[in-house]
Image (cartoon, rainbow, N blue to C red):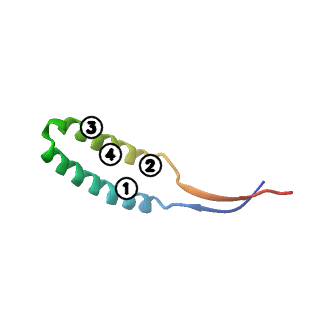
Amino acid sequence: MQLVDEWVMDKNEIKDSDDYIFNHLNKRCSELIDRYPDKRRLFENYIKKQEEENGVLENKVICSAMVIKRIA
């Protein structure tokens, strides 16, 4: 097999994407907490887990796409 092309996502792109998604998730969880106060802990734990996962994506993982060709 031969690597034909590779694209590595820039850390700033990842952070921007994560921030955009997280802000919407956080807003929605706040709305759901207001609507279902008995589920507050569930939504708060979900947001905490998302923060942890964003940290991993932004600091410990390299996002890339590779095009690999089979050599006959």
Closer to the camera in the image, 18 or 37: 37
Instruction: Answer left or right for 17 relative to 38.
Output: right
Amino acid type, label 3 = Asn
Cβ atoms under marks 1 and 2 closer than 8 Å: yes
The residue where tag 2 is placed is 57
Distance between the alpha carbons at the discs numbered 1 and 4: 9 Å
x and y percentages locating residue 55 in the rendered image: 38, 46
Q: Residues within 10 Å of mark 2 (few under 14, many from 20)?
A: some
Where disc 1 sits, the SS reads helix
Q: Secondary structure under badge 2?
A: helix
Q: CA distance from mark 3 to mark 1?
A: 18 Å
Give the image location of residue 56, x and y in percent.
43, 45
Mark 1 surroundings: few (<14), some (14-19) or many (≥20) residues within 10 A: some
- The numbered mark at residue 51 is 4
- Numbered marks: total: 4
Q: Which residue is label 1 attached to? A: 18
How packed mark 4 is, by other alpha carbons closer than 10 Å (few <14, some 14-19, many 20 or more), is: some
Dot 4 or dot 3, earlier in sequence? 3
Between discs 1 and 2, the one toward the N terminus: 1
Can you identify the residue that label 3 sits on? 45
Question: Is the C-beta separation of discs 4 and 3 under 8 Å?
Answer: no
Q: CA distance from mark 1 to mark 2?
A: 9 Å
